[in-house]
Image (tube, coloured by chain):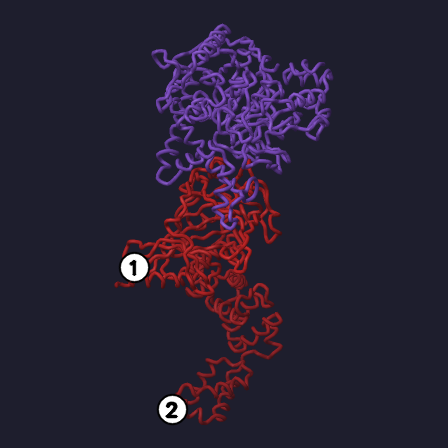
Chain colours: A red, B purple
Amino acid sequence: MSELEPVIGLEIHVQLKTRTKMFCGCELSFGEPPNTRTCPVCLGLPGALPVANAQAIHLGLVIGLALGSTLAPRSVFHRKNYFYPDLPKGYQISQYDEPLCGGGSLGEVRIHRVHLEEDAAKLTHVGESGRIHGSHESVVDFNRGGTPLAEIVTEPDLRSAEQASEWLKLLRTTLRQLGVSDVNMEEGSLRCDANISLRPTGSQELGTKTELKNMNSFRFIERGIDAEIARQERILNDGGQVEQETLHYDPNSGAITSLRSKEEAHDYRYFPEPDLVPVRIDEQMLARAQGALVELPAARAERFERELGLSADSARMLAFRAEFGGFFEAALSAQVDVASQVLANWVTVELAGRLGDGVDPTGAHVTPRAIAELAGMVSAKQISVGAARQVLDKLIAEGGDPAEIVQAEGLQSLGDPDELADIVAAALAANPDAATRVREGNAKAIGPIVGHVMRETKGRADGGEVTRLVHEQLGV
Amino acid sequence: MSSADIIALSAAEAAHQIATGALSANDLFEAYRARAQADDLNCFTWLASAGGETGAGAAEDLRERPLAGVPLAVKDLFCTAGIPSQSGSKILAGYEPPYTATAVARLQTAGAPLLGKTNQDEFAMGSSNENSAFGPVLNPWDRERVPGGSSGGSAAAVAAGLAPWALGTDTGGSIRQPAALCGIVGLKPTYGAVSRYGMIAFASSLDQAGPLTRDVTDAALLLKHMVGRDPRDATSLRLPTEIELPGREDLKGVRLGVPAELTGGSGEGDAGGRGADGREAGIEPGVLDAFRAALGLAADLGAEIVETVSLPHAPHALSAYYVLAPAEASSNLARFDGVRYGLRAREGATESDLLEMYERTRHDGFGPEVKRRIMLGTYALSAGYYDAYYGRAQRVRTRIAEDFAGAFAEVDFIVTPTAPTVAFELGSKTDDPLAMYMNDYCTVPMSLAGIPAISIPCGLSDGLPIGLQLAGPAFSENELLDAAYALESALGFDGSLARA
């Protein structure tokens, strides 16, 4: 059996950050009591009619432009017909073969399309497990029904669960920066289904795909996709065939169960929504959407690399974590004489490392200017790296001015080279065994000697300079 | 004034009398309410109570308004807050909406209080008002016969003098055809002229609200206060000009087109065109005679009768309509599922099975014609059939619209009999749905093209009324009303026989 490669595409639903719903004037709900943000339209009462939300269309266009999609000059809403209690009209107003945007890409993944539709209501099954089996009653909350959604569909360009999870994070950062959505998976403003198939590596044909739904965290998505890849591998390696079906992944048990087989698949009987007119994009709408675009992470990373000569890793970290990127750019604008990469390291390694996971530097006591000045002092050899780290700790704890802290703590580098040479000599005398081993070629033995010097100088000596002096004085 | 004197007034005349103080709005309301209460035609599914909040108590305050308190009968499918709005169906029996349809609200604001809700074919599907869950409506001209449909209750009420005027809806002819069979005036406006917000939907791209009245002036008056853009209806339009009351006295310079396809002129003098399935439209000789006589009168008034105008795709209109309308209806009626409102079937149901609840509710709640059209419509939209049926029907629709546009380059109005027959006997067509559909033969083309059309009574055949239909280009309501008014005056049709 030749090696199999996974082929993965994602279908992402994003709740748009409008004031009101997609087709009516009800305000969007954030945890209000059930059925308090409703009206005849989103309840699907007899005689009610939809009216398209212009702001939702605008946000859809912004997404399309940000993804480099083609914006359809004319797009059409379609009815997607099926029966379910969370669908009050018995159809969802969505888009079919004339969507708002087509094509585009983000990172390494091509986008197939972006379209607009309305969200379903929220169904709760009252029973022990909260799932439909075993529940004695189901209740519907229509607050969510009608919320505007953008559906983003990728081409099947992803090749692993990890890659899919990473790409989804890039999409999330991008959408958050655009301000089009809260994109919070726990709250449900970002939802992702995966289409997964396997094929022999190198083949151009697509295998039978399954659709994996209901994964509501990045971790579950990755684990779910991995579990499904493993499941399909087992089937194919046993000589069987993968069935086209819709599957549910249970993160607790790791089990994958079937929701719906191909035979039970709905015929949605799509037809153009007769209650709405087609959407035509005019110059004003286009200009407004273009005006809303911000520099997006991928472009920003590329700019950092190209214009500032930052390493790919530094560029990526600063671009993808907007709060650090902003801090860095503010530090740059302090116009201290220090190399960009050096400054970047101070931000991405020294500062980020000390602040800890997920902490936003914009709220810290240390200011971008302070970091820049600190890095500048090190570059100018006014203080050692070790001393600078001590200063940084203080800046983080209390804020302040780096130069003043250096003065107050007496952390300046040793100004007099002779003074340092004397201290090195004294350290060699105090550590004769270490000195001998270094002379014999054991580089690591220098540790205690350097430590001695650092203690004597309270860390003000420059480590590199100390090492040089030791070697010079030992004649190695 | 005696009750008989009051009932003899047209709506416009009554409004004038009230405005000048010669008639009390209360008296007008009560006169009609009493007659409606005694209704033996089954026109009403709900009636305002004497002096109730929607009734006469408020009427006095209305004399300053344009419609001066003249009460209005409203077809059941218009949502009226807190008042049953059932669209003639058991699945909505007793349903009271929390809001009022825009068209009704506008008329109430203009000063027309709600008299009652009128009976109709279920979900507006029918041409005889025999499909109602609340029993058939009888024709006041002959109680063994149908009033037409689907706005049968509204038409019969106006014809019988149980309401001064009424609101109906027209999807394929449901205002015009009952108007013809009941000897009154019925107008379907340009699609989009009147808001559909609050109209329980049948076929979204075809449904339009319109007036059913005793004469053309009343129709203009009612229409005037209904039309206009509604932000709640994305398909509604602002009309380029305001609706005016008609006053035209002749038809000099008016070119009337008589298309062979819809008027029995298709060669060798056979009576009526042919439907695409080969059936004859079957325009009765009596109807054709009255139609031709009316054309003669029009010519006397100075109109030029143009027999060479053609609507080549009109014979396919009925087929296209009976694909498109049921398709849209199959989707519009999906919301009636027992979950949130209306009927939910419980008897015998295990109640733990969703599908069973859906099936029982819709089985018990919908009548046979509605079920038939839902099935037809679902089929026409289903995978593999969409292009052959729905897609094709849409293309035919475009051709029909083009036919009219071409015709209106040569003539000002198209004129046809409104319906192929006079009122037929109850039960005579209920076994043959296709025969029933043929009632719409002359009215459906205008619906598909979205153009306005009016039916006015033009004569009797065996004591039963016949309607003449005038259709004009989109937004030609004023010109249409004017031409109809001139012809109406000349025809001098007396509808009072039905109001005895």
Location of mark 1 (residue): A240
Left or right, B209 with reference to A222? right
The earlier-in-sequence mark between 2 and 1 is 1
Is there any visible trace of residue A306 in the rendered image?
no
Which residue sits at x=60%, y=18%? B160
Which residue sits at x=29%, y=59%? A240
> A105 or A386: nearer the eye?
A105
- Crowd around label 1: few <14 · some 14–19 · many ≥20 (10 Å): few
x and y percentages locating residue A458 in the rendered image: 56, 83
Looking at this rendering, what residue extends furthest in the left direction?
A1
- Crowd around label 2: few <14 · some 14–19 · many ≥20 (10 Å): few
Question: Nearer the observer, disc 2 or disc 1?
Answer: 1
Q: Determine the image quadrant of residue A21.
A: top right
> A355 or B180: nearer the eye?
B180
x and y percentages locating residue B206 in the rendered image: 48, 29
x and y percentages locating residue B18 in the rendered image: 70, 18
Is there any visible trace of residue B173 in the rendered image?
yes
Q: Which mark is residue A440?
A: 2
Q: Quadrant of the C terminus of chain A?
A: bottom left
Which residue sits at x=47%, y=51%? A13
- Mark 2 residue type: Glu
Q: Are marks 2 and 1 on the same chain?
A: yes
Above or below residue B251? Residue A194 is below
Q: Chain of mark 2?
A: A
The residues tagged by marks 2 and 1 sit, at their Cα atoms, a distance apart of 67 Å
Q: Chain of mark 1?
A: A
x and y percentages locating residue A90 in the rendered image: 49, 42
- Mark 1 residue type: Gly
Left or right, B108 with reference to A388? right
Q: Determine the image quadrant of residue A81.
A: top left
Q: Quadrant of the N terminus of chain A?
A: bottom left
> A25 or A163: nearer the eye?
A25
